[in-house]
Amino acid sequence: MAKQFTHAATKDVYTLREDGLVEVKSAATGETGVFTSEGEYVEGDLEYAEMVMCQFVGRSYPADQPPPAR
């Protein structure tokens, strides 16, 4: 299952794709756009996304990664 979160206020859906980019679907318009984990626009009809949500969905966190080998 892909990492996916819905924005509490806008209801926009942020989904992590297999290529590491974040797909955003606007609840208001139905438009979609693709962004980097820093919120930079890549492609699609939707050209704006919240950077913090893109970071939250698109980045790995310590709990998602095994500890480094020593």
Image: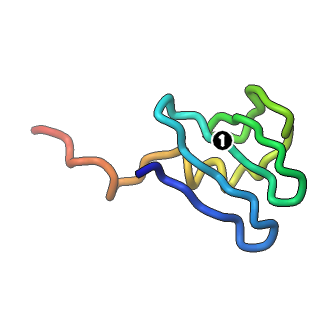
Q: Nearer the viewer, residue 40 or 24?
A: 24
Q: Which residue of the protein is positioned furthest toward the left in this rendering? A: 70
Residue 24 location (% of width, % of height)? 71, 46
Q: Residues within 10 Å of mark 1 (few under 14, many from 20)?
A: many
25 to 44, vertically: above or below: below
Q: Which residue of the protein is positioned furthest toward the right in this rendering? A: 29
Q: Is residue 3 left or right of residue 67?
A: right
Instruction: Identify the residue under disc 1.
Output: 23
Residue 64 location (% of width, % of height)? 33, 52
Q: Nearer the viewer, residue 17 or 70?
A: 17
**Amino acid identity at mark 1:** Glu
Q: Which of 35 and 44 is in front in this view?
A: 44
Rendered residue at 58%/34% (across/down) = 21
Q: Is residue 35 left or right of residue 69?
A: right
Rendered residue at 72%/73% (across/down) = 8
Q: Which residue of the protein is positioned furthest toward the bottom in this rendering? A: 8
Rendered residue at 57%/55% (across/down) = 56
Q: Is residue 70 left or right of residue 28?
A: left
Q: What element carries label 1?
A: strand
State the count of labels: 1
Q: Quadrant of residue 44?
A: top right
Q: Quadrant of residue 22?
A: top right
Q: In this view, does 66 lie to the left or right of 58?
A: left
34 to 15, vertically: above or below: above
Residue 33 location (% of width, % of height)? 76, 37
